[in-house]
Amino acid sequence: MTPISSVSISLCVLVSMLTGCGPDESPLRAENTNLKQQLAKQEAVLSTLQEGSKVMQQQIDLLNQELRDAKKEREKAQAEVKAASERLEAQLAQTRKLTAEVQRTSAAQAAQSLRVEDKGAQVEDLPRPLPAVGKAVEASLAKHGYVIKVSVTTDQKAVYVTERKVSAPGSLEVSGFRNQYLISLQTLPSKATRLSVKADFEKMAHGNKILAASPEEAAEIERRLIADISRSLDSAGKL
């Protein structure tokens, strides 16, 4: 065999090996296709998640805005309630002030009109302030069954008018008599209190006939009440 023939045979064998005997690429292509499909699915899922996240963020933003609006409305309502409360309190304070002024004026007028009617009463100055004497007067009247019909009190004066009652046996009146008290208190410069007691005292005769009592009898009843009030003050001072 000639050298040229040997070379030709070698070339033919090499070409055959390169063309007919190479590795099979089909599994690589299948795997590559599978990977591309998985990637596409993952991208689709990611896109869906991103869209969902975007929608959720929009909802969160909307809720936050609603919360901010609700907070502003609540703060506005609270401010309005506070302002209304302050206005109401100011009106109540003004009303209380006016009411107190009216009461003081009425009390002063009533006390002045009642003071004129206690002429001829028994009077005694007690070394105690007006509030203490007023409590003693109320306690003594209640103890002897007198109901206070009118009570007028100011810083410097107090006036009490009782209901008229028929006297039962007791320490102040004689049984079968009717009586009504007019009591006035006046603060003195020495911080003492002037007590004035006027009794409208009547006798009850047979058949419920009413007879006028003598001035001496009325004065005696007035002095008895003053003495009872003094005892109440002394008892209160010892407590």
Image (spheres, rainbow, N blue to C red):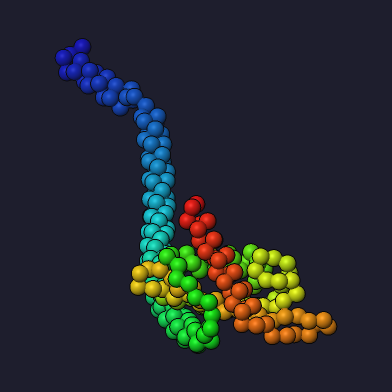
Q: Residue at x 72, y 80 (%)?
A: 203
Q: Residue at x 69, y 65 (%)?
A: 170
Q: Answer left or right for 131 relative to 138.
A: left
Q: Quadrant of residue 85?
A: bottom left
Toward the viewer: 122 or 236?
Answer: 122
Residue 150, percent from left and from top:
58, 79
Q: Is residue 201 above or below residue 7?
A: below
Q: Answer left or right for 110 relative to 91.
A: right
- Among all residues in the image, which is located at the extreme top? 1
Q: Quadrant of residue 18?
A: top left
Asked if one can make out residue 14 in the rendered structure from this viewpoint, the answer is yes
- Among all residues in the image, which is located at the extreme left? 3
Q: Is residue 236 above or below residue 182?
A: above
Residue 11, percent from left and from top:
22, 21
Residue 154, percent from left and from top:
44, 76
Residue 4, percent from left and from top:
17, 18
Q: Is residue 84 above or below residue 46?
A: below
Q: Residue at x 82, y 81 (%)?
A: 206
Asked if one can make out residue 65 in the rendered structure from this viewpoint, the answer is no
